[in-house]
Amino acid sequence: MRLASLWLIGVAFAGAARGGAADYHKAPAAIAKILETPPTPAVAISPDRKIIALLGRENLPTIAALSKPILRLAGYRIDPVTNGQAEVRTTWSNTLTLLDVSTGHETPVALPAGVRFATPGWSPDGKRLAFVVQVADQLAVWTTGLDGIAKPLVEHANAAFEGAPFAWLPDSSGLIVRTVDAGRGVLPVAESKPEGPVVQDGTGRRGATRTYEDLLRDNADERAFEHFFGGQLVRVPIRGGVATPIGAVALWKSFSISPNGSYLLTERLKRPYSYLVPADFFPTEIVVATLDGRPVKTLVDRPLADNLPVDFDATVKGPRKAEWRADVPATLVWAEALDGGDPKAQVPFHDRILMQAAPFDGAATTLADMTSRFDQVVWGDDRFALLVDREWKTRTEHRYAVAPGNPGPTHLLLTRNYQDQYGDPGEPVTERNTAGRQVMRFTPDHQAVFAIGEGATKTGAFPFLARMPISGGVQTIMWRAKSPYYERVVSLLDMTGVNILTRRESATEPPNYFVRKVSGGAPRAVTHSPDPAPMFAAVKRRTIAYQRADGLPLAGTLYTPAGYDPKRDGPLPTLLWAYPAEFTDASVAGQIVDQGNRFTRPRGVSPLFLLTQGYAVLDNPAMPIIGENGAEPNDTYVKQLVADAEAGVDAVVKLGIGDPGRMAVGGHSYGAFMTANLLAHTALFRAGIARSGAYNRTLTPFGFQAEQRTYWQAMPTYTEMSPFTFADRIKTPILLIHGAADDNPGTFPIQSERMYAALKGNGATVRYVILPNEPHNYRAMESTQETLWQMTDWLDRYAKPPKPAPATPAH
């Protein structure tokens, strides 16, 4: 197997870029202390809302763990030893405690020392929790009861595909699990002598594909893909009995059980594969079968989808997004494009939603025709379901009411810009029914459904619980969070919505769960997670509002170090850390939401750690790029970006906090792209930090970020937006950091490699740091500390020292 070529990429570049390998640096002591604190537990709430599973999370993995051999196949990264997702793609838990919501009693789940687990899932009856455990050289599915006694259920689970490799039967009597093919044998080692040339033929097929990572590359990769992703579905009872195979071994990408437990909906990948697109585009067969594997209906046998239009709303022809209707025993629902998959087609409706009830031998019924591309359906009952479609180009969302018992007619409930924070009506509250499927919670009179929303306003976000009339019209707010708290509804605890479970935080209180009445009164704390970084509590934070030169309102969150007094200490070296966003409406782009009621503690490679080193940080200042009335936002990208940055710098300087001679700018991914552009087109900053960015847009020719035009359709825009084009203008010191195993489409490590070469060749002050074996978002503790050390060192060298006074001309 070609493991070296598949996973040891980072090591190969490290010496070339840095002039030789170096030991990892430790972050400054104050930063390291916070990093070593275990993260706050995650939670998984039982369907009956009686139990909260507290999931103790592992801290950052070591670089040794991250550097274990992995396989990169068809867009996935897997661990060939366990046959699961690679370390960089898995969030592991290491402790499990069951908390009774009503009494507060905690039941620790007994797990072997050193065990780690992932993807917990409650049974529909709320009496058992299943999860995937890493055991030596394999993954196993375990379950625990409410008594805290855990036991293994089935060995050799196949978790190569994303998501949990199991699904609960609706009656909670057992699970269906995807397991490793027991008869697959040993993967043949690829010969060092090539089998022949790799030939890709695009004759007669136009395929405008984006830049994807980790694709198949040759016949050996194809065999490895089938070896590790091929699995056997088995039915496993909870109490006694043996695992029963379901159907044959295949590439079972996904599977779900009908609400009545009689049928299985499967999605299976097939040959021929592609070296141009990831597995999601491979030939796909969607089939309904019985639970013993007998095929009942083939919904679609779709060919390779490597020739889709480049537009973001482009999709495949034929049935897609198949699912079970959640509120009835066994009805299949799917979408089909009415525009041939091309959103530019001039048609009255772009998608049709169809449904067909068991035994699936009658004609399919049209549930609704959609004006734009189908997004989702939220199920209720025969009288009401909520359908949502979206159009990317205009950022428009439509919500329709439909009666599944009388399909066809729809009632438009609202049309909105889905980027509009102030006008967001929220989402219906859903809960699992007896079959374990998510359905909307109706009010007792059935005239409305309960809804929860963010409640964004200029003064802050104050989440709410509301009655959303199913006939449309104005919502009735039942409860809303109040200052100084950010408190959102997690679930309803009774049929009337009088008692609710919330997650509450404030600027000074860490997030915890509470039981409260919507009528008021003091809430009762259910969890008691402490402040994970109390040394950060004295940091000062405020939302600052300001205007762009054209009058557009902007805002950002300004942090200053603990103990800082602007009158006593004067202006500080300041870092602007940002990420641009595209809009089609200036009124939406200019929305300000105060963040003063949120609890903030840095984790990972957060720029907020620099507060411990004497810097002020303007975090997430608005950097909108707006295209109104059909104009493309990016055609004026540089002009708007510069105006955004000038406004942010001016704002912190006017407050007397930011020192205009000691300003720095930084960002990650698209924020890195932004950073390089600002250094090329302005003289605002003393230093820049660009992490895991893309700098040459000719290397992403079929669209990037929010740009869906191709390079050949918008060549001047691609050229002007590429800071690589203007590398000779970048004279400000810039730090480039990139994960050598970047897994994000568009940000191949070669982007930073070539940008470094361009900058160095033009005499720039530049440092290029490659983090071996790291993906797009850095994971290892050593890499995290290295990144924070590099950021601190760079700014200490080039941004913190007072700017020299201009020389006095001789007379």
Image (cartoon, grey):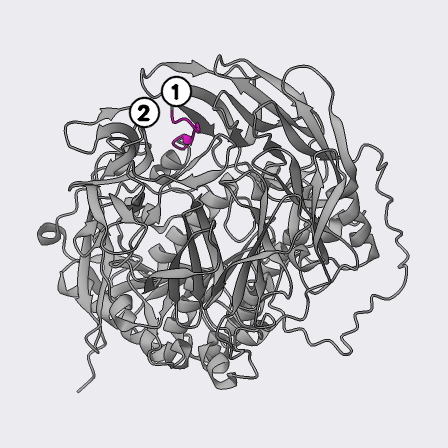
Image point (37%, 66%), residue name: 581
Image point (14%, 65%), residue name: 654
Q: Is residue 377 above or below residue 24?
A: below
Q: Is residue 750 above or below residue 682?
A: above
Please, what is the three-letter code of the amino acid marked with disc 1?
Leu
* 10 Å crowding of disc 1: few (<14), some (14-19), many (20+): many
The majority secondary structure of the magenta stretch comes to loop
Among the 4 quarters of the image, the one containing residue 410: bottom left
State the mark number for residue 99: 1
190 vs 259, nearest the viewer? 259
The image shows residue 690 at horizontal and vertical percentages of 44, 62
State the mark number for residue 527: 2
Please, what is the three-letter code of the amino acid marked with disc 2?
Thr
The image shows residue 584 at horizontal and vertical percentages of 35, 73
- Left or right of 280 in this view: 531: left
Q: Quadrant of the C terminus?
A: bottom left
Image point (30%, 24%), residue name: 528
- Farthest residue in the left direction? 567
Among the 4 quarters of the image, the one containing residue 390: bottom left
Mark 1 or 2, nearer chain start:
1
569 vs 88, nearest the viewer? 88
468 vs 583, nearest the viewer? 468
Q: Which residues are magenta?
A: 39-49
Q: Secondary structure at mark 1?
A: strand
State the mark number for residue 15: none
Residue 432 visible in the current orientation? yes
